[in-house]
Image (spheres, grey):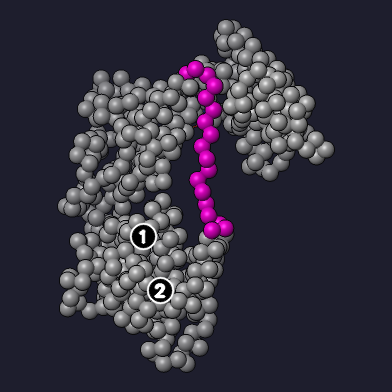
């Protein structure tokens, strides 16, 4: 086992630390009777299981309390053990029965000296099984600790099926798990360990960053409106637009506003995966499906179960895989490569392309039937040069994010820098704007960014059409005047939004919107001395 622990501290890291500690005190364990050693480890395993389960559910965006189905249970125990340092994968799953194998023991070679530690696996699998199905019987059919070369855990979650099979039984009654070895959980130990592990988990909880999408221009507002309308449905959406315009952020917004928001959002870039691997990446493969397929591989469809799958660069999808994707969209089912078991896909599909699909469709590179299935709702995002009204809000938003990222005071753009921005035609769109501003942010010492387009190698900004340029300049001047008026009013009224709204003759909601788009914090005006 690696000596390094993941940081920050979380239940998994804590358990790893505990494992290292247990190995150190193996001598002490050795002084106990064999049965007492097992009971000691079983108690720890039962106590660890509930906290590991809730941390695992959180990581996989699963409901905190609803009982898991068998498939999710299998994914969860595999994921938990692999985070602790195992290399588990599911080998088979039939109704009422799950089997998993492991090729690397989290305890390392030390397990040979203390094979009782395998009990930890039974108790974690058994306790989580019992909590979700009421009953579990776990049999460690093979064990690295006893020289089998791998571990194979067989778990029965139906008592009738388990009858006559070897293994240790776990039951849950009124939320308390008991096992055939130790009876009920040790409530005191359970409480102590949960306090430590779960408290740590709460302080290190990773929440997905909130999505903030700038949409000031009529075109982006229209795109956002469509996103809001389709979000609560399961309709497929095809997002088109040049590189860097915000296709993925729109997809994430649709997911975040929909009913699947607390389930996974999984992205796959079809253009970045070698053609021969796209099918196995999407649909997974069975063990032995081809040379080198030693383990079952869960594809993106399985990983996105219950959530959203974002198929980026869909235009690169090989024809053979298009057929299989069409079937998922039509019937909601698929098989892993080399597998005969039909799996159900509860996945919402969002797709994106930065290439015009008409040529591809005409030349037979993309199936018409699949295209119509994906393109139920089209959203086209215009390039930044055609929605220059978004530029100032985007720049302010990006600068604000940069000051958070680098933990330094906010910086603003001077008039020359603004002029440079609005004179550029943005072939790389918002991604280019982000890169440019980041460079300027890092190389500007004071709070005022004077220049932004000092491109390496002296590349100068392309000049846009005059009409766009003038319109952009007008917009920038208006935006700067608006910002100044709001700041002055906030100053006068010490950050009181109602008073500011009254003075400017707008609603408080409008003031809040403007504050957001200009990146102004009213709190800073409530304590004038601190400024
Ligand atoms: N309207 C917006 N508001 C705020 N940030 C945005 C907006 N649009 C794009 N961005 C930001 O710009 C960057 C590029 O956006 P995104 O990755 O969504 O573009 P894309 O069209 O998928 O690009 P590519 O074609 O290169 O994959 C991201 O960091 C994203 O957060
Ligand atoms: Mg993208």
Do the numbered discs 1 and 2 sit on residues whose CB atoms are within 8 Å?
no
* Residue 472 in picture, x, y percent from top left: 61, 14
Place residue 224 in its image quadrant: top left
Q: Is residue 208 magenta?
A: yes
Q: Is residue 477 magenta?
A: no
Kindly identify which residue carries mark 2. 46
Q: How far from the left and from the top, in percent, is residue 504?
A: 68, 19
* Relative to 275, 255 lies left or right: right
Q: Classify mark 2: residues with Cα within 10 Å, few (<14), some (14-19) or many (20+).
A: many
Q: Quadrant of the C terminus?
A: top right
User: On the image, which quarter does residue 364 sit in?
Assistant: top left
Residue 82 shown left or right of residue 526 in the figure: left
Please provide percent x and percent y for residue 361: 27, 23
Residue sitting at 52 percent across and 52 percent down?
206
Q: Secondary structure at mark 1?
A: helix
User: Ligand 2 near label 1 (Cβ, under 8 Å)?
Assistant: no
| Residue wearing tag 1 | 76
Q: Is residue 436 visible?
A: no
Can you say whether 13 is above or below 361 in the image?
below
Provide the residue span drawn in magenta. 202-219
């Amino acid at each position: 086992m690696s000596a390094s622990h993941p940081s920050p501290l979380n239940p998994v890291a804590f358990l790893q630390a505990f494992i290292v500690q247990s190995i150190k005190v193996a001598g002490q364990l050795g002084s106990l009777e064999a049965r007492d050693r097992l009971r000691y480890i079983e108690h720890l395993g039962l106590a660890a299981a509930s906290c590991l389960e809730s941390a695992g559910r959180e990581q996989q965006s699963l409901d905190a309390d609803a009982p898991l189905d068998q498939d999710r249970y299998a994914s969860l125990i595999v994921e938990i053990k692999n985070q602790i340092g195992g290399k588990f994968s599911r080998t088979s799953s039939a109704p009422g029965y799950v089997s998993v194998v492991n090729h690397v023991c989290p305890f390392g070679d030390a397990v040979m000296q203390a094979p009782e530690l395998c009990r930890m696996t039974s108790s974690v699998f058994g306790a989580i099984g019992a909590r979700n199905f009421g009953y579990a019987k776990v049999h460690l059919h093979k064990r690295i600790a006893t020289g089998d070369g791998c571990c194979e855990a067989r778990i029965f979650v139906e008592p009738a099926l388990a009858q006559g099979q070897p293994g240790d039984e776990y039951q849950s009654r009124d939320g308390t798990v008991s096992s055939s070895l130790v009876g009920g959980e040790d409530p005191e130990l359970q409480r102590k360990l949960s306090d430590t592990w779960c408290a740590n988990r709460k302080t290190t909880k990773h929440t997905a960053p909130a999505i903030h999408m700038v949409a000031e221009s009529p075109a982006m507002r229209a795109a956002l409106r469509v996103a809001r309308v389709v979000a609560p449905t399961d309709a497929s959406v095809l997002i088109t637009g040049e590189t860097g315009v915000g296709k993925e952020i729109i997809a994430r917004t649709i997911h975040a506003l929909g009913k699947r928001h607390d389930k996974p959002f999984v992205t796959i870039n079809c253009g970045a995966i070698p053609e021969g691997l796209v099918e196995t990446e999407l649909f997974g493969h069975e063990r032995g499906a081809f040379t080198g397929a030693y383990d079952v591989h869960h594809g993106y469809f399985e990983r996105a179960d219950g959530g959203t799958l974002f198929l980026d660069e869909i235009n690169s999808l090989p024809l053979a895989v298009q057929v299989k994707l069409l079937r998922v969209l039509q019937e909601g089912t698929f098989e892993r490569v080399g597998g005969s078991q039909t799996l159900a896909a509860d996945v919402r599909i969002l797709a994106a392309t930065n290439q015009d699909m008409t040529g591809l469709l005409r030349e037979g590179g993309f199936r018409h039937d699949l295209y119509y299935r994906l393109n139920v709702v089209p959203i086209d995002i215009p390039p930044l040069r055609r929605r220059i009204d978004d530029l100032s809000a985007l720049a302010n938003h990006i600068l604000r994010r940069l000051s958070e990222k680098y933990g330094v005071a906010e910086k603003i753009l001077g008039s020359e820098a603004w002029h440079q921005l609005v004179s550029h035609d943005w072939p790389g769109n918002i991604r280019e704007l982000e890169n440019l501003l980041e460079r300027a942010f890092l190389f500007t010492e004071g709070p005022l960014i004077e220049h932004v387009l000092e491109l390496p190698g002296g590349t100068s900004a392309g000049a846009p059409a005059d009409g766009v340029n003038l319109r952009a300049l007008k917009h920038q001047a208006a935006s700067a005047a608006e910002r100044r008026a709001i700041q002055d009013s906030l100053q006068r009224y010490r950050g009181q939004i109602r008073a500011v709204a009254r003075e400017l003759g707008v609603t408080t909601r409008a003031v809040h919107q403007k504050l957001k788009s200009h990146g102004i914090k009213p709190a800073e005006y409530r304590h004038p001395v601190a400024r």
